[in-house]
């Protein structure tokens, strides 16, 4: 009798080992723990990809909002942005930056020198921009960033030497 109980106990232990959770799931046609783990890993990787796409979208939305704010700022300043290619006779090859605030253009060199001295006295670095028709424009606040150019224009507009019709030159 004792042998029978011991044999049944050993048989029950082996049956329990064979009839584990995955064994029973496989018999029932259900996914095993390995299948469940693979599915969990797939879901996590898809969620990470989705989060990355959403972060990229938020970055693009912020860039668009910043661009729209810049356009609103430009419109609020009621200023002109003029590409150098549209100004016939402008020689911009020697200019170091893409954008300049043009605060005046003169045919008389003495007037150009006066404006340059006023602007430099106010702390601005000036650049002479010659035209082939004899005029010389006075450019200040050279930069390669449009946002900086309009921030400079806003700042320069309150200076005493700056006329109300100052504009941004785009050096193409």
Image (spheres, helix red, strand yellow):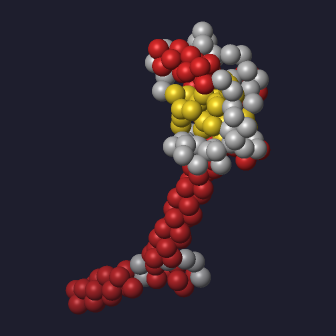
Establish if 105 lies above or below 38: above
User: Residue 171: horizontal and vertical position, in percent?
Assistant: 63, 44
Work out which residue is located at the far left of the displayed protein and give it. Answer: 2
Q: Quadrant of the N terminus?
A: bottom left
Q: How many marks?
A: 0
The residue drawn where x is 59% and y is 20% is 110
The one nearer the camera, 111 or 103, is 111
User: Residue 17: horizontal and vertical position, in percent?
Assistant: 35, 82
Work out which residue is located at the far top of the displayed protein and give it. Answer: 160
User: Residue 156: horizontal and vertical position, in percent?
Assistant: 59, 19
**For residue 165, which quarter of the picture?**
top right
Establish if 23 lies above or below 89: below
**In this rendering, does residue 162 appear at all?**
yes
The one nearer the camera, 135 or 118, is 135
The residue drawn where x is 60% and y is 25% is 109
**In this rendering, does residue 141 appear at all?**
no
The one nearer the camera, 83 or 67, is 83
The residue drawn where x is 68% and y is 38% is 131
Establish if 128 lies above or below 88: above
User: Residue 10: horizontal and vertical position, in percent?
Assistant: 28, 86
Establish if 86 lies above or below 121: below
């Amino acid at each position: 009798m004792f042998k029978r109980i011991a044999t049944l106990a050993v048989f029950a232990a082996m049956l329990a080992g064979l009839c584990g959770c995955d064994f029973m799931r496989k018999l029932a046609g259900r996914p095993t723990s390995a299948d469940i783990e693979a599915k969990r890993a797939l879901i996590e990787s898809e969620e990470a990809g989705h989060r990355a796409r959403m972060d990229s979208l938020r970055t693009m939305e912020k860039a668009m909002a910043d661009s729209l704010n810049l356009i609103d700022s430009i419109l609020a300043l009621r200023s002109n942005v003029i590409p150098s290619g549209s100004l016939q006779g402008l020689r911009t090859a020697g200019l170091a930056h893409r954008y300049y605030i043009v605060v005046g253009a003169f045919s008389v060199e003495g007037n150009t020198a006066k404006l340059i001295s006023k602007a430099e006295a106010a702390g601005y670095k000036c650049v002479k921009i010659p035209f082939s028709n004899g005029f010389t424009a006075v450019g200040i606040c050279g930069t390669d960033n449009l946002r900086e150019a309009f921030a400079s224009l806003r700042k320069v507009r309150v200076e005493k030497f700056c006329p109300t019709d100052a504009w941004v030159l785009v050096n193409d």
